[in-house]
Amino acid sequence: MKHINDYIETHKDRFLDELFGLLRIPSVSAIADHKPDMYRAAEYWKNLLLEAGADRAEVYETPGNPVTYGEKIINPALPTVLVYGHMDVMPADPLEKWNTPPFEPEIRDGKIWGRGADDDKGQGMMHAKAFELMVKTGTLPCNVKFMIEGEEEIGSAHLGKWCAEHREMLKSDIIVVSDTSMIAPDIPSITTGLRGLAYWQVEVTGPCRDLHSGLFGGAVANPINVLCKMIAQMTDENGKITIPGFYDDVQEVSPEERAMLARAPFNLENYKKALGLEEVSGEAGFTTTERTGIRPTFDLCGIWGGYTGEGTKTVLPSKAFAKISCRLVPHQDHEKIAELFKTHFESIAPETVTVEVTPLHGGQSYVCPIDLPAYKAAEKAYREVYGKLPVPTRSGGSIPIISTFEQVLGVKSVLMGFGLESDAIHSPNENFPLEQFFNGIRTIPLFYKYFAENLKS
């Protein structure tokens, strides 16, 4: 452990400078105008890996955004770890909510501030620097491959095909991902499950043009009103989703596993206070942590139509739109759910409007067995750095490509996240504590050490 701490202490300022260079690139995959920035980020990652000690690193084209691949093969007979991360980030809107510009990172109050500080540039950089540390100190115990993609925030639409085309190149014994969170800085945890995702855009059309709300209001259906009523029908008074067939494949968690999950530290009052809430909500019969970990959800992610500018405009709009998502649990197939929602939503539309449902993206859920050698290695590494055994948790979030890796590459993933709930990922003022950043760099080399030992024994 001493050589790890010594290397970090010597190079920590440079580590942060290199992270800041990556954070300054506005690699927003959801906005087409940022396509050149995706290539800037890909080249940045290529140079990072080469300078860290990779034998080779290349930027690969896909029909969408690029993928950066790098590797160091010290002995083909040794185990191989494949590190997955993503270079793309969420849009920074609303810009007025940021205390400092999102792509001008800075350190304040012991934290790194900027879009991507946690998700996933900061966490990805931990792996690059841990890899560098092992190479430069001669302590790398196995082969390492890196796969850094540019479309995670928009569903990784092209990565599955790219993986299939490069299956031989990507051969590995385990995939390591740091794109998740811990319970608290003093309560380490390892994510053992991710929910799946289905995502749509809906369009409701009424009259052929926007109308005067005084002359036509009350006689012509308002698409926004109709859309709101339709969305309100999607859940009942107990928070249960009303789509026919939605729960048919839901894996019910056993009382024993629910009891195990309940042992994870959680303070409901602190949770509500942190979010500025008087009360929580959700499906009846389940706790807050169960609602976000083992149960599916239905959420309206955005809604618009009509006039939303400054002042007033008395308009009855021609169209209304919404973006809708469902988080899914094991055994729910995102393509099946996408079709169930489309069929149901279109069927409940009144004759006064027409409705079009367009699936945007989705992915399957994922569960990591806690008896994997990689999980045991991660568990031991966290314990050495944080001084206590990490708690296995199920995340409410989704990384759709993780289940694809298992299907296409035949390899499991271990989710070694170091983010915190307070990091505000996907929100204004995203941040990442310096302590978590450096603890990640401390933990990852120990994972490699114990993983290599586990496979030898």
Image (tube, grey):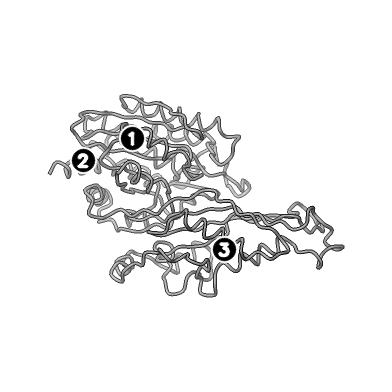
- Residue 317 percent coordinates (x, y): 76, 56
| Disc 2: CA contacts within 10 A as few (<14), some (14-19) or many (>=20) | some
Left or right of 241, for residue 321: right
| Disc 1: CA contacts within 10 A as few (<14), some (14-19) or many (>=20) | some
Upstream in sequence: badge 2 or badge 3: 3
Residue at 43% x, 48% y is 400
Residue at 30% x, 43% y is 410
Residue 355 falls in image quadrant = bottom right
Q: Which residue is mark 3?
A: 344
Q: Which residue is mark 2?
A: 449
The amino acid sitting under disc 1 is Arg
Pick whichever, 126 or 320, lies toward us.
Answer: 320
- Residue 248 percent coordinates (x, y): 43, 66
Q: Gap between marks 2 and 3, in whole Å?
A: 52 Å
Upstream in sequence: badge 3 or badge 1: 1
Pick whichever, 414 or 320, lies toward us.
Answer: 320
The numbered disc on residue 167 is: 1
Q: Gap between marks 3 and 1, in whole Å?
A: 38 Å
